[in-house]
Image (tube, grey):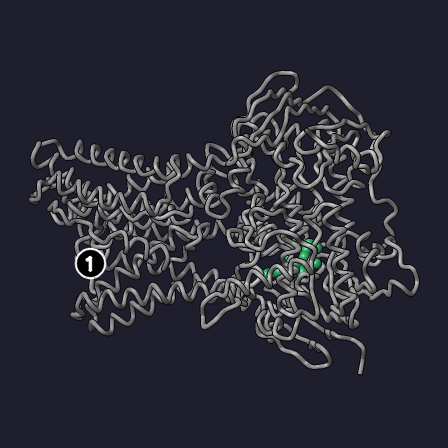
């Protein structure tokens, strides 16, 4: 056949502009994050970025971020999970009973709680994957079932305290290694530098691979800006944390989860199957993807992550309460969609969901500091979610020409 | 004043990274049937989408004159308002609504906001009569075949007082009989003064009904031929499309036939929802290594159902029979089991069953055999790229990189991605369901060559096709299927269109 399609824009500037418009979504969400940070930094008269508050924002949003990771995977597969808030409460209650009432050691309680998460996920995964009930219904039922069970387990009281180790998982910090210049906690600085170095190295490696494969369309300048920005962000956070109490333990957990799940979604066969499923279920089926098993495992995975979030939350509050986790599912779902996941499935990323979760977290935190009531907080979060998805849809229409 | 109902001048349309149309011009005379030909990805569908307002004014350069007036359609409603109606390459009917509801969808017969059911059904019946359909207007779309669905689309166009009807590959999914009916209908509408533009890769159809042909290549107009003036032959059109002479439509194939690789015995399949209905009756087929076997049958004879029930029971209920691979009985209860036994099935409906349209070329190609590219569950991106790039080159997939989203490829190029995907799985038996549907003549030749190569490698190839000349041109042996029963097994040297037709229409009791 004849000559290949004519690419437009041979000059580098035109190409860069072309690229940036095609990446509007990713750029948009970053800019939104920056705008929100700057805005609240001004509105809170500098409180937002003060070291203690940064530490708080991370710790207090960690459980929603953990949920968001599992949620975005479920959404990519074309499902939804409305039950995670109730599961957070349920697992917190179980952990409370096991440690406080039955006196089990903390590590055994954690293992048992995570296993309970597996069972919860398997229960829901069974109905969705093998019985064929839409996830919306199964998890709506799960929302009621596990909220009810939370109250049954707790007998309508609350349990406190939790063992120190579990409290540390929720709100504790890594041990300090002394202070650099009497001001910056050494371990945190080291971790920050390492993380930044790894990020830069991974970014360069990725680019080299894409270059070799001739798939690179990202302009060099933009690549450098992006990498420098992310590295600077990591370092800034590290130094802020270092000048307060060091690295929150839950941040380490979260960091590991992000790395592992990003890799799973980007490079593993299982991750590919999730995208294939959400993109076109029939085609995936006819390509030999074991769609039922993939779906089942997704819900099991969500169950485990929800259990982890439940442990973190209960540990942080030092309390198991019948209302723990109420409404968390909405924040997790909103995080995934603000982070660019598509309602129809097949599209989304773990990092996107994390950024989406941070946007919500910073909004919550900033608005609380300046004394906005929960009424207006909800209103504003709703508007942000709507605008993010509207921006998405608008973009798609513009580029697809439809 | 010209007699042209439509003038498109210097149309240029760019997508991010792709110039789909460059300075294309098109003139269509009032009352004619005007065909548009060109290779896959030449820009035919894009040009028609520009014309019908799918791509709104402002998103392209150039001018459109309809009935001598400059028009700038902002959307489909604008173009329909002046009588330009497009029927897309993919049918756009709502499956669970009735025929009548579909005809008036978006254009409802109403009284003060309430549907006027009498008017809806009565007028629908009249429109159906005009297109030669006798079905009840309250029949659901799912209950009628594709051939009739295409006619419903035309009835829908007629309800909009169409002056210029645009059909994008209307017969691609139809069998010969339904196609003939549709073409007759177009001629009939022409006698009523309706102008039509038809895109088709089936040159015999074009020769039959078109008054002129415009040929597009790589987003540029090559020429417009007047069919009446100098007896334009199919070869002449092909030459315009591919820019050179194409000597044979079918590549030469010397069969080198070995041992039997697949045998299906006494295969009976029931309908998935209507369990008492038998869709396939005790079919026996086999294919040997190096052999290309055709399955001919009318639409609804059960060709796809036969193939899909063998391929991991993806169709049907209460399936019975035996499958032997290389002489050993095997089970194919799931797709992965079938693939594991070296059986592959490339679907006829690439958009619904073949591709993940929101993902890129390389991931679609690797999709059916990702395991081959993975070590301990992790995909090797380098190797994946190399594999996909190899197919992009060898299959001539028109796209700058393998990172392009398949949903944005032209129909024919999507089909090549589906084929690449199954070639990559490297099966022993490859079942190809309508492998050249919607594919241009040049690319068809390439695909036939690929089929020959696969057979040459000792694979068994089964080709299901509605185009008899194609089966006759490439197969070593042809089974005929009529109402779910295999009626004959005809070797190449005995096969003629008449003989095939006779067995394809043999009555069953
Ligand atoms: N929405 C889109 N975004 C990007 N590129 C597109 C889009 N739609 C079409 N293209 C590109 O424009 C070119 C022309 O496509 P078009 O669908 O018009 O081809 P066609 O002539 O109808 O081919 P076929 O015979 O295969 O249907 C192709 O290279 C295609 O990849
Ligand atoms: Mg087309």
Q: Quadrant of the C terminus of chain A?
A: bottom right
Q: Nearer the viewer, residue B246 or B310?
A: B310
Classify the position of ligand 1 by quadrant: top left, top right, bottom left or bottom right. Answer: bottom right
SS class of the residue under badge 1? Answer: loop
Q: Which of B114 and A215 is in front in this view?
A: B114
Q: Where is residue B501 in the image (x, y as percent from the top left)?
A: 79, 37
Q: Nearer the viewer, residue B425 or B346?
A: B346
Residue B258, compared with residue A107, is above or below; it is above
Residue A25, compared with residue B314, is above or below; it is below
Relative side of B119 to A321, left or right: right
Outermost residue on the right side: it is B230
Residue B138, compared with residue B315, is above or below; it is below
Q: Which of A198 and B121 is in front in this view?
A: B121
The chain ID associated with circle 1 is A
Relative side of B82 to B504, left or right: left
Ligand 1 near label 1 (Cβ, under 8 Å)?
no
Q: Position of residue B293 (x, y in %)?
A: 74, 30
Relative side of A147 to A224, left or right: left
Q: Where is residue B228 in the image (x, y as percent from the top left)?
A: 89, 64
Which residue occupies 13% across, 43% down? A151
Which residue occupies 73% across, 75% down? B9
Q: How crowded is mark 1: few (under 14 residues within 10 Å), some or many (20 or more)?
A: many
Q: Where is residue A12 in the image (x, y as percent from the top left)?
A: 59, 67
Q: Is residue B399 visible?
A: no
Q: Report the residue marked by disc 1.
A: A243
Outermost residue on the bottom side: it is B1
Q: Can residue A149 be seen in this view?
A: yes
């Amino acid at each position: 056949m004849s000559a290949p399609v004519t690419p437009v824009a041979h000059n580098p500037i035109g190409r860069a502009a072309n690229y940036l418009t095609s990446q509007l979504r990713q750029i948009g969400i970053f800019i939104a994050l920056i705008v929100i940070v700057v805005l609240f930094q001004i509105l809170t008269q500098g409180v937002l970025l003060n070291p203690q508050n940064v530490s708080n924002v991370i710790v207090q949003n960690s459980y929603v971020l953990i949920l968001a990771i599992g949620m975005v995977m479920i959404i990519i597969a074309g499902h939804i999970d409305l039950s995670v808030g109730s599961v957070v409460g349920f697992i917190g209650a179980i952990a409370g009973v096991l440690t406080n009432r039955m006196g089990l050691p903390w590590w055994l309680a954690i293992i048992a709680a995570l296993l309970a998460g597996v069972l919860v996920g398997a229960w829901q995964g069974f109905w969705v994957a093998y019985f064929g009930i839409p996830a919306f219904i199964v998890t709506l039922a799960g929302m009621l079932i596990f909220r009810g069970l939370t109250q049954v387990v707790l007998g309508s009281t609350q349990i406190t305290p939790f063992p120190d180790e579990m409290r540390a998982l929720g709100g504790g910090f890594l041990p300090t290694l002394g202070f650099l210049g009497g001001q910056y906690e050494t371990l945190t600085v080291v971790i920050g530098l390492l993380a930044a170095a790894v990020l830069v190295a991974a970014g360069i490696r990725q680019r080299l691979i894409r270059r070799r494969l001739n798939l690179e369309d990202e302009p060099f300048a933009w690549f450098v800006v992006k990498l420098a920005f992310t590295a600077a962000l990591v370092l800034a956070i590290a130094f802020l944390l270092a000048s307060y109490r060091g690295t929150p333990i839950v941040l380490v957990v979260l960091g590991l989860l992000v790395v592992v799940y990003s890799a799973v979604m980007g490079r593993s066969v299982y991750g590919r199957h999730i995208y294939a499923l959400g993109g076109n279920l029939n085609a995936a089926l006819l390509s030999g993807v074991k769609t039922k098993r993939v779906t089942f495992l997704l819900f099991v995975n969500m169950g485990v992550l929800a259990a982890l979030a439940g442990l973190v939350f209960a540990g942080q509050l030092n309390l198991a309460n019948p209302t723990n986790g109420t409404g968390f599912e909405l924040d997790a779902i909103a995080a995934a969609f603000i982070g660019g996941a598509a309602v129809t499935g097949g599209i989304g990323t773990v990092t996107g969901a994390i950024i989406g979760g941070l946007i919500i977290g910073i909004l919550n935190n900033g608005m609380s500091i300046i004394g906005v009531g929960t009424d207006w907080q909800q209103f504003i979060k709703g508007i942000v979610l709507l605008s993010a998805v509207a921006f998405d849809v608008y973009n798609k229409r513009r580029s697809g020409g439809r | 004043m010209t007699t042209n109902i439509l003038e498109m001048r210097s149309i240029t349309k760019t997508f991010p990274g792709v110039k789909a149309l460059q300075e294309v011009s098109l003139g269509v005379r009032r009352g004619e049937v005007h065909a548009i030909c060109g290779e896959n990805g030449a820009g035919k569908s894009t040009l028609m989408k520009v014309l019908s307002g799918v791509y709104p004014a402002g998103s392209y350069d150039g001018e459109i004159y309809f009935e001598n007036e400059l028009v700038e359609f902002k959307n489909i409603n604008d173009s329909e308002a002046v009588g330009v109606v497009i029927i897309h390459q993919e049918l756009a009917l709502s499956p669970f609504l009735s025929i009548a509801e579909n005809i008036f969808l978006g254009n409802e017969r109403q009284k003060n906001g309430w549907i006027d059911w009498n008017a809806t059904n009565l007028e629908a019946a009249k429109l159906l009569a005009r297109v030669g359909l006798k079905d009840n207007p309250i029949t659901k779309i799912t209950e009628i075949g594709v051939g009739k669905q295409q006619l419903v689309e035309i009835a829908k166009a007629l309800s909009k007082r169409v002056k210029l009807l645009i059909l994008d590959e209307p017969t691609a999914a139809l069998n010969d009989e339904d196609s003939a009916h549709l073409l007759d209908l177009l001629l009939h509408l022409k006698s009523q003064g309706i102008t039509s533009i038809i895109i088709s890769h089936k040159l015999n159809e074009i020769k039959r009904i078109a008054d002129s042909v415009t040929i597009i290549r790589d987003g540029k107009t090559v020429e417009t031929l007047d069919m009446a003036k100098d007896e334009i032959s199919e070869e002449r059109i092909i030459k315009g499309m591919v820019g050179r002479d194409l000597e044979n439509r079918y590549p030469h194939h010397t069969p080198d036939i070995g041992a039997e690789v697949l045998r299906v015995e006494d295969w009976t399949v029931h309908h998935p929802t209507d369990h008492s209905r038998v869709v396939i009756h005790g079919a026996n087929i086999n294919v040997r290594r190096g052999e290309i076997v055709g399955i001919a049958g009318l639409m609804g004879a059960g060709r796809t159902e036969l193939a899909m029930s063998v391929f991991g029971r993806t169709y049907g209920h209460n399936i019975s029979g035996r499958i032997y691979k290389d002489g050993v009985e095997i089970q194919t209860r799931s797709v992965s089991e079938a693939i594991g036994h070296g059986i592959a099935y490339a679907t006829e409906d690439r958009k619904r069953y073949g591709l993940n349209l929101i993902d890129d070329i390389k991931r679609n190609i690797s999709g059916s055999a990702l395991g081959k590219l993975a070590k301990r569950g992790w995909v090797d991106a380098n190797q994946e790229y190399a594999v996909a790039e190899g197919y992009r080159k060898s299959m001539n997939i028109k796209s700058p990189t393998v990172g392009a989203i398949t949903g944005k490829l032209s129909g024919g190029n999507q089909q090549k991605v589906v084929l690449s995907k199954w070639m990559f799985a490297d099966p022993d038996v490859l079942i190809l369901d309508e492998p050249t549907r919607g594919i241009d003549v040049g690319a068809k030749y390439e695909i036939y060559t690929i089929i020959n190569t696969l057979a040459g490698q000792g694979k068994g190839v089964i080709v299901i096709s509605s185009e008899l000349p194609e089966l006759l041109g490439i197969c070593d042996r042809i089974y005929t299927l009529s109402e779910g029963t295999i009626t004959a097994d005809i070797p190449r040297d005995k096969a003629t269109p008449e003989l095939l037709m006779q067995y394809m229409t043999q009555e069953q009791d």
